[in-house]
Amino acid sequence: MMKFTWLVAQFLNPLIDLKKYLLLLAMCVLLASSCKKEQIELLTHEIDTGTSLNLYDIFFANDSIGYACGGDRWTKGVFTRTFDGGKTWSKADSIYNVAAYAIHFFSAGEGIVAGNASDWATTTDSGRSFILTNSDYHPINDIALRDKNTWVRVGGEGFADGFISSSNNAGVSWKYTHLPNNMTAVQFADSSTVFASGYGVIYRSSDAGANFNPLEIRGDFFIAMDFLSGQLGYFAGYEGSILKTSDGGNSFQKVRGGNAPFSPRVHFQAIKFWNENVGYVVGENGVMFKTENGGADWKKINSFTDVTLRAIHLFSAESGTVCGDNGKMFLFK
């Protein structure tokens, strides 16, 4: 009798395993279908930038006049401009012999471009001509300017070599804070509060960049940020996490978890919000997500390119432009 029972069990087990397999397969199909429905379709239009070099940053002085910069790390820095809201761009002119990583304009005509090897350039005629400066060898990854005199810049190389530097005299002299972390992003949240972020760290200044203090946060390479006010801001991590602060950096909420084993990996490069509800984050391999509820949920946007997207500007909650590697730029809505 026991032998008969064992034989029946051996016959039924494969059927039970098959049922489990089919059930698991059905659940996976339903889950995939559900995820697909959550994706957003954007209408995009690729723009000719006249360069095949990477574009690292984009800045619009108003809805019509905008600028982008990029280049090759050790051989060429390029700059291009638009006067029709990003529909057409000028020839990508070379401004110095290293890549240009960051751009900021005070007005439609006056601005600054900074990049590798501490090269930076100022213009007063919308980028038709530049005055070049090289203070010392400190690769600049990002710049933030409160006004024509008060500037903060961050940079570094690798993971364990970085800096924050500030100037209160339009870059004539700089105060340096050297750090064991590559620093990649900096922004004035208001006239006195500045945030700087990088490899595993976020720093805050309450005196317009004169002094910075580390905040109690770890867990990702915080490669980009965007603040809507002195209180409300977001940080995007290279490993897929997104942090939100609603109290000026005193506390943080993780509104998107980072990469996990056995799940698709994403690597973010830039984040931008239109208002307290609507924001976008972009990154490697053309990845792009959107939130419509202040970061509580993020929906993936259907891929329209496979290049790394490194910068984003918004014209509205539904439209904007993104740029990235190989000179690629797209208008979307």
Image (spheres, rainbow, N blue to C red):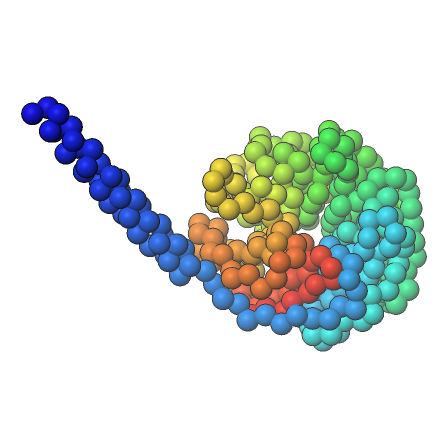
Rendering quarter of residue 304 = bottom right
Res. 203 visible in picture: no
Q: Give x and y (percent) for residue 217.
A: 57, 33
Residue at the image position 83 percent from the left and 46 percent from the top: 116
Quarter of the image that includes the N terminus? top left
Above/below status of 302 relative to 200: below
Q: Which of 303 and 299 is in front in this view?
A: 303
Q: Give x and y (percent) for residue 85.
A: 69, 72
Query: Farthest left residue?
Result: 1
Quarter of the image that includes the C terminus? bottom right
Res. 197 visible in picture: yes
For the image, the number of numbered tags is: 0
Q: Which of 121 and 115 is in front in this view?
A: 115
Side of 283 where 120 appears, left or right? right
Q: Give x and y (percent) for residue 17.
A: 26, 40
Q: Nearer the viewer, residue 40 or 167?
A: 40
Residue at the image position 62 percent from the left and 51 percent from the top: 284
Residue at the image position 10 percent from the left and 24 percent from the top: 2
Q: Which of 45 and 124 is in front in this view?
A: 45
Side of 329 where 166 appears, left or right? right
Query: Farthest top residue?
Result: 2
Residue at the image position 39 percent from the left and 54 percent from the top: 32
Rendering quarter of residue 52 = bottom right
